[in-house]
Image: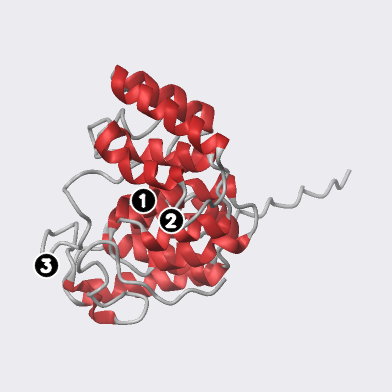
Amino acid sequence: MTHPRTSPATPGADTAADPLTDHAADTLTDHATGTGPRPAAGPSEPAPGTTSPGTTSPGNTPPGTTTLAAATPAELRDHVTAGLDDPARGWLRRALDEAAAHPGTHGPISVWELRIAEAGRRCGPEHADAARVLILHAARADAEALSRVYYQGTGAERRAVLYALPHLVPGPEGLPLVEDALRTNDTRLLTAAVGPYAARHLDAHQWRHAVLKCLFTGVPVDAVADLDHRAEGDTELARMLTDYAAERTAAGRTVPADLHRVLTLTDPPATPSAPAADHG
């Protein structure tokens, strides 16, 4: 399904030049030096599924997982319900039951879509992303339904769709949503976009640019699913990273530490040396 480019969910999120198309992109914040205006990313908080150094985020990341996209519905439900008070827990249980009983599309808007819109108010900001992902799972939303929620939703609702993609869309039909998110500079949306679904379906060219976009906007590369495997031996990614580092150095800017980490991952695996010949 082809969609027109939409307005960013975060005001101003797509107004700056993109490092993938314009070298003037460093008008955004350099997270190493703190210079330049901050990229539009909503309230000052870690991206869901990540934590700031030295902090924990119990409402966003279930134990033993790295992102909401990596958690199973059972893990998410156990973790979220443990953190909710009784009214919120009851609301979530009813919302999931409704979604399971009436999946798919019914009329102009499904009842479960209304519950997704209510999740922030009912469950609080710490648990809203996970609650929305659970509702999408319960509704068994397909690629068409996810696209409708994404393109009509708020930034928070778009994040939930991106987190739900790996479990709900087995094929590449959800790629337009990932591609749309990667065009923004909303760091929370970017964090959700580079999860397991992107690792599975983005081609090499798109994936390399997604990694570079993370470096440009300050999204930790820990958010990039399957980074070690996909970066291994990628000489084209190494060239792009080296060029980007050279441009920053020439401009007197600090090279992000994550860039050096990814560059190290691109080294080809060592070739085992041949056993010494036995000359008797």
Q: Residue at x 55, y 40 (%)?
A: 102
Q: Marks 2 and 1, Cα distance to the nearest angstrom?
A: 7 Å
**In the rendered structure, which amino acid carries the disc numbered 2?**
Val
Q: Marks 1 and 3, Cα distance to the nearest angstrom?
A: 29 Å
Q: Residue furthest right?
A: 280
Task: Kindly identify which residue carries mark 3.
Answer: 36
Q: Marks 3 and 2, Cα distance to the nearest angstrom?
A: 33 Å
Closest to the observer, 229 or 159: 159
Closest to the observer, 111 or 218: 111
Query: Which quarter shows the C terminus?
Result: top right
Residue 221: numbered disc: none
**In the rendered structure, which amino acid carries the disc numbered 3?**
Gly
Q: Residue at x 15, y 62 (%)?
A: 38
Residue 149: numbered disc: 2
Q: Residue at x 45, y 22 (%)?
A: 78
Q: Is residue 228 above or below residue 126?
A: below
Tag 2 secondary structure: helix
Tag 1 secondary structure: helix
Residue 157: numbered disc: 1
Image spot of residue 10 (x, y percent) = 24, 61
Q: Quadrant of residue 215?
A: bottom left
User: Can residue 219 be seen in the rendering of this structure?
Assistant: no
Q: How many marks?
A: 3
Labels 3 and 2: the sequence-earlier one = 3
Q: Residue at x 38, y 26 (%)?
A: 80
Image spot of residue 198 (x, y percent) = 52, 57
